Amino acid sequence: AVLAHQLSGPKWLEVLLLTALLRDSGRPGIHRFCTSLQTDSPMVSLSRPLARVLLLCGLGSAQAVSVEIDAMKHDIQQITMSNFDGVISKFRDSAVSSLWFFKGDNKADVSFLDEYNKVAADLKGMAKVCAISCTDWPLFCEKQGVKETPAVMIYPTNPMPAFKYEGKMESKGVLAKVARFIPDFTTKVTKENVDAFITTDPTKPKVLLFSNKKTPPTIWKALSSETVFKRTVKFGFVSEDEKDVVQKFKVKKFPAVIMQRGSKAEIKETFSGEMKFTALKDWVNLHSESGMGDKVASAGGSAQEESIEESKPWLVQEVPELTAKSQGDVCFKGEGLCVIYLKEGEITQAETDMLSGLSKKFTSQLSDRGAKMKWMWMNLAIETEYKTLFEPAMLPSAVVFNPHKRLRFTKLDHGEDNEVEGDEQSLTNLLDKVLGGDARFKMVPGQKLPGWAKRDAKKTEL
């Protein structure tokens, strides 16, 4: 009003400009007003008082640069002294946080805003990326030992203490430091433990990431340590180098994410969405509720608890190994003939695929005949008494075993000069003879199975 009073004559334009200036209060408002004058308004002859106002306006615009965290534009969560405990301290057991201490009018903080927001965007949902104004809460900053800004404190999960970030104030460095402390509850899955991983804790879905990297990425670590998922889902990591596991799941492209679930891991599903944290989390979350109870009491009411199928990986294997523990489930209980592939040593993935293919082929042929065949393999280097029983002319070989009523078996014929190898064609010929009624079965002596090899109980590391 005082300024307007100084105007002489019908300076209606000047009055209008002053009114807008006074109504648009606050430094940012002054800055916007001045900018519009400089760029949009036609220059007219102004009075000396208004010229002084515009000079002051110019000074205001020079001082208007400040840190403004906008929830609509930024992914940073701005906090106060009063909610620090509720946002950060309360979740120290499960979540990693970072906190940027800034002063609103500090040029270095203004420059750091965009860098820090990149960290918040990249870690959205995976870590808490927060900021607090030391202009508004100076006592809190002083208590935290912050004397200069910008400063970033990182809060790892308990019991690790919080510490000040000492690197370059750039997004790359801050991001790497925060990501390093995200807990990793993933399991490195190899040929040796893949079956145990899939069958342990059958109520929990198993989610596998197949990657051409050597270690789990930040997204995968964050999913595995998510508050609900770490109780209800198991996350596995498979490197491209684990070729047997890659072939087992028939993975052709990297990265790939596959989920197996069900009491016998019979349901398999491949993720087809975008490889982003939120998309993966939403997909996994559809099935995470099934993992609420992962333990059941063992038989006889024993205090010891174990998973229903913790020690039965053969239930999910395409072609299981025939051993003392698996023989009941795999062959000798239930209906059907047992097709036993005989090896001197471990079976290869190529052999597994070959047997799996034959299994599907003959299952289709037998579907309308009421007959059933069960497929498996046996390591004769270990099960030596069965090597004596079957007396294979060469290895690999195969037998078809009838375990019902009278124990008897028929062998693959390798020819007079052992010129017939134990391959897909010779196995097909053997099965055609059995199904055609042309195979000769030999009785098991004394109608008693040979003794099974005693194997050391070794617990697979998960």
Image: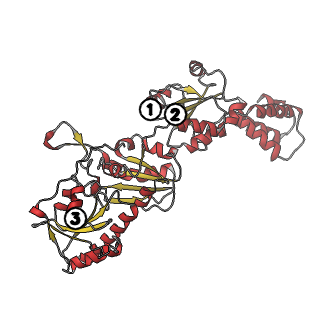
Among the 4 quarters of the image, the one containing residue 63: top right
Left or right: 383 in relation to 114: left
Q: Residues within 10 Å of mark 3 (few under 14, many from 20)?
A: some
Q: Position of residue 386 (x, y in %)?
A: 22, 59
Q: Which of 252 and 436 is in front in this view?
A: 436
The label shown at residue 310 is none
Q: Nearer the viewer, residue 104 or 64?
A: 104
Q: Where is residue 454 in the image (x, y as percent from the top left)?
A: 22, 48
Q: In this view, does 220 lie above or below 394?
A: above
Quadrant of res 52: top right
Instruction: Tell which circle, 1 or 3, labels the residue nearer the N-terminal end.
Output: 1
- Give amino acid for label 1: Phe
The quadrant the N terminus occupies is top right
Tell me, for residue 390, which label it has, or none.
Answer: 3
The residue under label 1 is 91
The mark nearer the N terminus, 1 or 2, is 1
Q: How far apart are marks 1 and 2 (CA)?
A: 9 Å
Location of residue 57 with respect to 237 vertically, above or below: above
Residue 25 showing in the rendered view: no
Give the Cα distance between marks 2 and 3: 64 Å
Circle 1 Cα neighbour tier, 10 Å, few/some/many (<14 / 14–19 / ≥20): some
User: Residue drawn 55% across and 33% down?
Assistant: 98
Per the image, the residue denoted by label 2 is 97
Q: Position of residue 320 (x, y in %)?
A: 29, 59
Of 231 and 4, the residue lying toward us:
231
Mark 2 or mark 3: whose residue is earlier in sequence:
2
Question: Residue 33 location, x and y as percent?
Answer: 75, 40
Q: Disc 2 residue type? A: Ser
Q: Which of 439 and 260 is in front in this view?
A: 439
